[in-house]
Image (tube, grey):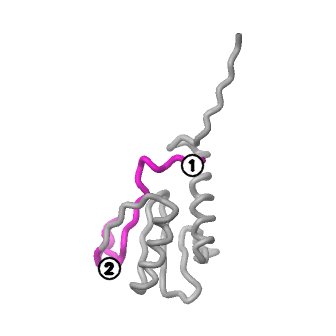
Amino acid sequence: MAREWMLGKVLPGQREGAAVWFNTLKATLKDGGLLQCPEAPTVWTNASRTLALMTHVDDMVMTGEDMELEKTESFLKQKFKLAVETGNQLSFSQEEHRDCQWYHKDQDEREVH
């Protein structure tokens, strides 16, 4: 007797998983009122341009006015489980970035249904 099994989730690390995650994140950010930069699809801002957000896979860096940062963080926490690091400096790619907040979607929450 032959059986077929269907996995109900996308596995992390698979090509399809990255696309599904990006589309989920993109839809969520749009629902939150953020606007995607046409020239750089991983860069987002709000309508008043008082917030900037950049994504890389399941990491985000945000900078902007405190009220906008708190509003966006609160919205994202309703949708995802977040680990938040705050501070005024972030270093990656041998460059320093000041007045940033770093967000990372927890590893155990990567499944997309």
Give SS at disc 2: strand
* Nearest to viewer (mark 1 / mark 2): 1
Q: Is residue 26 left or right of residue 53?
A: right
Local SS, label 1 = loop
- Against 40, residue 68 (above or below) is below
Q: Label 1, on which residue?
A: 112
Q: Percent from the top left, x then y, of residue 34?
A: 58, 76
The stretch drawn in magenta includes residue 104: yes
In the visual, does 63 lie left or right of 2? left
Tell me the number on the disc at residue 68: none
Residue 47 position within the rendered picture, expressed as x and y whole percent measured from the top left: 59, 85
Residue 30: in magenta span: no
Q: Position of residue 67 (x, y in %)?
A: 42, 85
Q: Quadrant of residue 36?
A: bottom right
Residue on which disc 2 sits = 98
Residue situated in front as seen by the camera: 79 or 22: 79
Q: Which residue lies at the image location 62% right of the left edge and 71% below the top edge? A: 30
Q: Nearer the viewer, residue 40 or 60?
A: 60
Q: Amino acid at mark 2?
A: Arg
Left or right relative to 94: residue 111: right
How crowded pointer 1 is (Cα within 10 Å; few <14, some 14-19, many 20+) is rated as: few
Amino acid at circle 1 = Val
In front of the other: 94 or 90: 90
For marks 1 and 2, give the CA distance: 32 Å
Q: Dividing the image into 4 quarters, which one contains the N terminus?
A: top right
User: In the image, which residues are magenta?
Assistant: 87-113
Q: Reply above or below: 14 against 30.
A: above
Residue at point 44%, 72% (across, down): 73
